[in-house]
Image (spheres, helix red, strand yellow):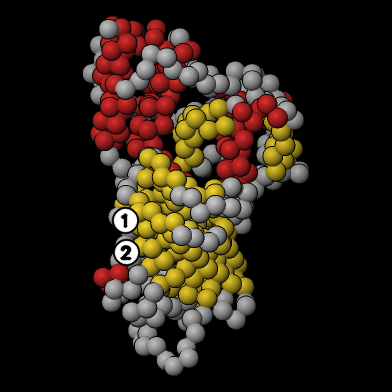
Amino acid sequence: MKEINNQNNIIKFLNKESSEEELDELETWLKNPKNTPVFNRFIKVEYLTALYMKDYDVSNAKNEINKKLKKINRKRKTFFLKKVSFVVSVLLIFGLAYIQTIKPTSSNNNQNTVNNITIGSSKAILTLGNGNQVSLEKGKKYTQDNISSDGKSLFYNEVKSKKKKRFEKLEYNYLTIPKGGEFFVILEDGTRVWLNSHSKLKYPAKFIEGEERNVELVYGEAYFEVSPSTKHNGASFNVLCKKQKINVLGTEFNIKAYNSDNLIKTTLVGGKIEIEKGSSKQVLIPNQQSQIALDSDNITIVEIDASQEISWVHGLFTFNEQTLDEMMKVLSRWYDTDIVFELEEKKKFVFTGVLEKTKSVKEILEFIEGTSEGEVEFDIIDMDKTVIIR
């Protein structure tokens, strides 16, 4: 009965219906470290991600939290993440403040200004069909034929005459996003693509009306909003990625396939896609993710909150019980830094939270360090753009 009361208190807390007595009970309950993962898992991640991503309904997040809390077993696994104060959590949930920096207890180097390690920004290298390369970045404009860029985005205007000529070959462009960068592109068919740091996309400068539209994510991470086939005489849209093929009819999905990753992860946000690898095929529905090992054709399907997976498009880092090793791979790409672990065991530190990509690396590391309560410490070597974890 006591467990049910605590669950009800969390739900009332989200709905701003808690009495003073209920808030006191919830605060007392959170003082027990074994209860913290429940609050972190279902509140700080699911609710906050929905709160800061305007495309997603916060009320739905509340309903999901409600359902999951009812399924919680009394015997819960205890993670390494230490408790953030209840007062800070209250501010977070009600939108009065975001995840504020918690001052570290050590690492004097972090008190210095970090100048060389900058926050990621819009930048890319466009490689044209003739091999010429164009640097795209904020403040620089570029225009040629049906291509234009304002320094933050790249636009391919629709080519009016797309009748196929005999022996005509498609001319492919490449958009390469370096570490510390991100970019947005609208392809000639109207398909919208967001590219994350350290990614590369291959695509035609123009598509042939009525024929298959094929693009390739060479490596990295990309979020697609595909122009439906009904607008292109039934022409299907396919995304190739490391021997994986995605057949799309008009939908939204995310692909993550960095060279350092062992798995290709494809997450469906809306619509329907078919994943194909070798002789294996699987159809995804929204909030499902396919996972395929590079050396295998087996397709594993897992249920996932798609809004968390694509939060990077909306300027957020969302970490849900991820190890510090996994987190630092993400942060190193965005801040273009090298990561050095002095002790292998530190890679296993587990973190749950939602952080803004607009924060400096110093602020992000201070927050992680503060929540670890001394278990993890960072040193920033500014000149070498290196973060040492000890």
Q: Amino acid at mark 2?
A: Leu
Is residue 48 or residue 344 the one in the foreground?
344
Residue lying at 47% horizontally and 47% vertically, measured from the top left? 291
Which comes sooner in the sequence, label 2 or label 1?
2
Q: Is disc 2 in contact with disc 1, using a CB cutoff of under 8 Å? A: yes
Q: Secondary structure at mark 2?
A: loop
The answer to whether residue 102 of the structure is visible from this angle is: yes
**Residue at 73 percent of width and 28 percent of height:** 343
Along the viewing direction, whichever of 116 and 296 lies nearer the viewer:
296
- Where in the figure is residue 49, as x and y percent of width and height? 39, 37
- What mark, if any, has residue 249 been given in the picture? 2
Q: Find residue 39 and report its image quarter.
A: top left
Q: Please give the residue where the numbered disc 1 appears in the rendered image.
A: 272
Query: Who is closer to the viewer here, 37 or 55?
Result: 37
Q: Is residue 385 left or right of residue 231?
A: right
Image quadrant in which the C terminus is located: top right
